[in-house]
Amino acid sequence: MQRSLLIASLLFSTIACYSQSKDIVGSWIWLDSVNTIQYFIKANGTIEERYAFSKEDIWKKIPITGTYKFKKDHLLTIKWANESVQIVNVKFIDNFTAEMQTLNRKDGPGDKYVFKKIIDEEVIPDK
């Protein structure tokens, strides 16, 4: 009985631990009725940022490119191609939602934006 409880406890704690790991890599999007912001963060350390009006196709916009480092203290440091540096505080709400705020603006911290992670699903047709 004790062994069964121990195994069940280990199983549930392992599931809980792994489900808490949040990954910055992926495509993140924020939009309102006027604007859209999209980050495409790659595992190789590069990042792309696109801006568009909400009614425009954001994927047709020319991206701003750069490199990034994501630290355990949830700070995303981005060095853009024009040599400017942006520091973003990232607070994960869940695995698919993150609140992002630029910290190093001249006029103080920027607004907080809630980004959603875009999940790409592949549809396999029946044979």
Image (spheres, helix red, strand yellow):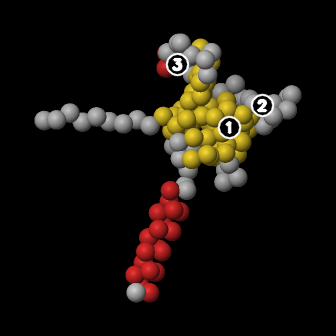
Q: Residues within 10 Å of mark 1 (few under 14, many from 20)?
A: many
Q: Residues within 10 Å of mark 3 (few under 14, many from 20)?
A: some
Identify the residue at the far left of this view.
Answer: 127
Q: Which residue is at the front of the view, 51 or 92?
A: 92
Q: Which one is earlier in the sequence, the residue at label 1 or at label 3?
A: 3
SS label for mark 1 = strand
Q: How far apart are the two marked residues, 2 and 3, measured between alpha carbons?
A: 22 Å
Mark 2, residue position: 110
Mark 3, residue position: 58
SS label for mark 3 = helix
Q: Is residue 7 left or right of residue 83?
A: left
Residue that appears at 67% across and 45% down: 91
Q: Which residue is at the front of the view, 88 or 35?
A: 35
Residue that appears at 72% across and 34% down: 112
SS label for mark 2 = loop
Quadrant housing residue 36:
top right
Q: Are marks 1 and 3 in contact (CB under 8 Å)?
A: no
Classify the position of the C terminus by image quarter.
top left
Q: Is residue 48 left or right of residue 8?
A: right
Q: Amino acid at mark 2?
A: Gly
Residue that appears at 40% across and 87% down: 1
Mark 1, residue position: 100
